[in-house]
Amino acid sequence: MLSPNDKKLGKLDPFYRPSVSKQKTSAEIISEARNALRTVRTQRPFTPQEDQRKLFGPASSRTLENRPPSSFSLHASSFESSDSRPISGARLSPLELKPKVPASPTTEEDSCFSFPKPPVDAAKIRRISSARARLFRAASQGALLPDRSLPPSDSKKTVESKETVMIADSMVKINGIYLTKSNTICHLKSHPLQLTYDGGCNEIKKQEMFKGTTSLPSHLKSGGDQGKRHARASSCPSSSDLSRLQTKAEENIETVCAACTQLHHALEEGNMLGNKFKKRSILLKTLYKLVDVGSDLLSLKLAKIILALKVSRKNLLNVCKLIFKISRNEKNDSLIQNDSILESLLEVLRSEDLEMNMEAFLYCMGSIKFISGNPGFLNEMISKGAVEILINLVKQINENTKKCGTCLPNSGHLLVQVTATLRNLVDSPLVRSNFLSISALPQLCTVMQQYMGDKDVCTNIARIFSKLTSYRDCCGALASYSRCYALFLNLINTYQKEQDIVVRVVFILGNLTAKNNQAREQFSKEKGSIQTLLSLFQTFHQLDLHSQKPVGQGGELYRAQRLPSEAEDVLIKLTRVLANIAIHPGMGPVLATNPGIVGLLLTTLEYKSLDDCEELVINATATINNLSYYQVKNSIIQDKKLYIAELLLKLLVSNNMDGILEAVRVFGNLSQDRDVCDFIVQNNVHKFMMALLDARHQDICFSACGVLLNLTVDKDKRVILKEGGGIKKLVDCLRDFGPTDWQLACLVCKTLWNFSENITNASSCFGNEDTNTLLLLLSSFLDEELALDGSFDPDLKNYHKLHWETEFKPVAQQLLNRIQRHHTFLEPLPVPSF
């Protein structure tokens, strides 16, 4: 005879069936998410590091003909003598009369130029000495000195500079140039650097000029055999001084580098940097000549001074190229860091005009990209505002493109360098914080939209987003930018067969839809979103099928490696997106009734095993699990439920615990159907579920108990719990996991409640030992002080209390009452301790 309370409970729906007549509690929502709907995780796509430093790596979509070079020759002659003369677009007509060499220069900048003379008559040449002929021939071609260093025999006629630059209280003499410190500033202002020709000066011996120095260290030499390199001749009357300075500089680079450092400090202290310095052009020409020395260390010193003197146009381009060449060698990173050249490069991006110096910006950014790959530069780049400068540069490009209605020439090449640099920087928490504070994400989305046809730019930005969306705050910021969803769908449609970009875009969508229900809804509302995912699924499913190697042709080795192929990696990320979208109550039923989506998921389980690609099989099963939650009309999952149950059997008998767990979860949803319950019993799946109760794994016990709960709804199948010690295993789960998992404890109580519906004697129903254990456990668990004694994490106390009060307590109390009514106590029961 059933008591009134038993009759009341007997009228309730089966425990597995959710109630739709009342509003769900928070505990019910959380419980349902655990039981049926769950997001899926996956690893971020791997990006291999490039072996060589180039503007565009080997994976670039740009052809060699359509991209700027990463290798080039650069010499002193590459620089323009004058940096202030405007560029004229007019072509001048040739002069009718041949010009004559002026008697004396009229301006400082013009003093270095001489006009060509007519060729010398051969008869006259034969009547003069060979030495005089060489000089005469050189003069006729516009050069007053031979285009090579003087031989030892002519050393007494070497040209020497008489200019003295004062630095501090001491005077340093370098190849005829004295540098001291005390009155440099006033001296440079009133007496600019002058190179004076003195044909009668005696040769200055090496040991006199570099007293106390040693020979040039081998690690400072670069660009070939510097000992055999000849200095370039100049058209200036004082070019011999420069040639001699280059030759001597090769013999002791360190001394010249020290002089450059002192010169830079002197110019800075004298407020003579920039483009207002009166004798700037003469100083620049001298610095340009030293480029031919070919030392990377010296070239960095020179580049820093040249940039500080605010060169423009061609000279700015060439000095950026000079630094770019040096930065291509990773061994020079320490030189770049010691010289703080990064600050000079960032200043170029901050202060120079973008449109006028696009190519210079390109090589400047190329250098910054190279050094950004070195973790040693990270803090320096952040502290110097690199992130803000680069995002501002992106913003300029966006504004110019919007204003002009078309992309600026070479702006795509520049954006490749900018986005690659940002990709290297976003691993830092400080950079991610900066990204959010300066609204960088919308700017990058705008670039992606405007440069949709540039695969390199889009790939780099996709790499940035794939990193950022792995973090909750950045993921939320991008998810709230509603325009990004249409943008990502457009990218997938544009590059559907390009694995490297598609896999990252799909990974980003998986991150956005993992924890944000609004993101799931916004993505689903985009026109053609599901069709795009289906088309992508079909494309890479076919690629994966064609890439399979049959057994006997490397197929066994292929399986043994267990590394996902490129096609499999896309499918892994794609099934994750589908699983996440299926959580949305509006989209889950839509996907469940889509024959294309469900068909491809089932096909994946048909031809893939856990040994082939574990993550793909598990993700596909998790997606089916989420879709099987919806009991809707025309559900493909419901139509094929028995076939799905057959496919899941191979997962249950595997040695992969994750695969087993996913299969059990699907059975938990499918076992709500009577036909599936019959299948489970006929194939002894229920025995496997009871065996899983011994797994000591809470999630597995929870899912297995859910299947057993659904089986006990059918009165004819309740007897199976006595097979294999099912009751004892359920009681053990209650004892082991109850105090820390009230959801699992609730499932155990519901299963035992169904099992004991027609109870007449508790001992005969559960057995004496299990009955006594149940009485002890339920009594103690219903004591709030004992049940919530704080043995778990204090931060989760409210969470535990919520589930204890709303889920466990009502069912456990009714079960305890039933057992007590049908049990005769032989002796008082002790209170257990936990």
Image: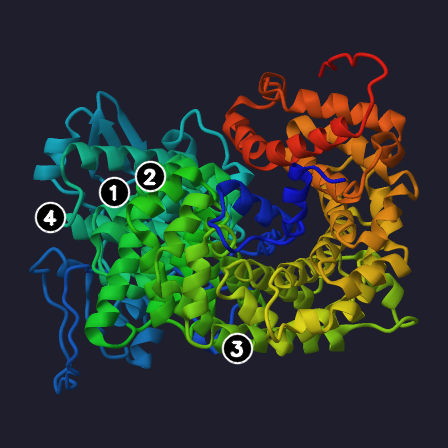
Q: Which residue is mark 1?
A: 161
Name the amino acid, label 2: Asn
> Which callout, 1 or 2, points at the residue further toward the start of the chain?
1
> Which callout, 3 or 2, points at the residue further toward the start of the chain?
2
Please indicate whether residue 521 sits to the left or right of residue 13 in the image. left
Check whether the beta carbons of the residues at disc 1 and disc 4 lie within 8 A of each other: no
- State how far apart marks 3 and 1 are (Cα): 77 Å
> Which callout, 3 or 1, points at the residue further toward the start of the chain?
1
Q: Secondary structure at mark 1?
A: loop
Check whether the beta carbons of the residues at disc 1 and disc 2 lie within 8 A of each other: yes
Nearer the observer: mark 3 or 2; the answer is 3
Determine which of the numbered discs, if any, sits on residue 531 in the image: 3
- State how far apart marks 4 and 2 are (Cα): 28 Å
Q: Which residue is mark 4?
A: 276
Q: Which residue is mark 2?
A: 175
Residue 431 to residue 458: above or below: above
Nearer the observer: mark 4 or 2; the answer is 4
Nearer the observer: mark 3 or 1; the answer is 3
Callout 2: few (<14), some (14-19), or many (20+) C-alpha neighbours within 10 Å? many
Q: What is the quadrant of the N terminus in the image?
A: top right
Residue 503 to residue 426: above or below: below
- State how far apart marks 3 and 4 are (Cα): 63 Å
Callout 3: few (<14), some (14-19), or many (20+) C-alpha neighbours within 10 Å? few
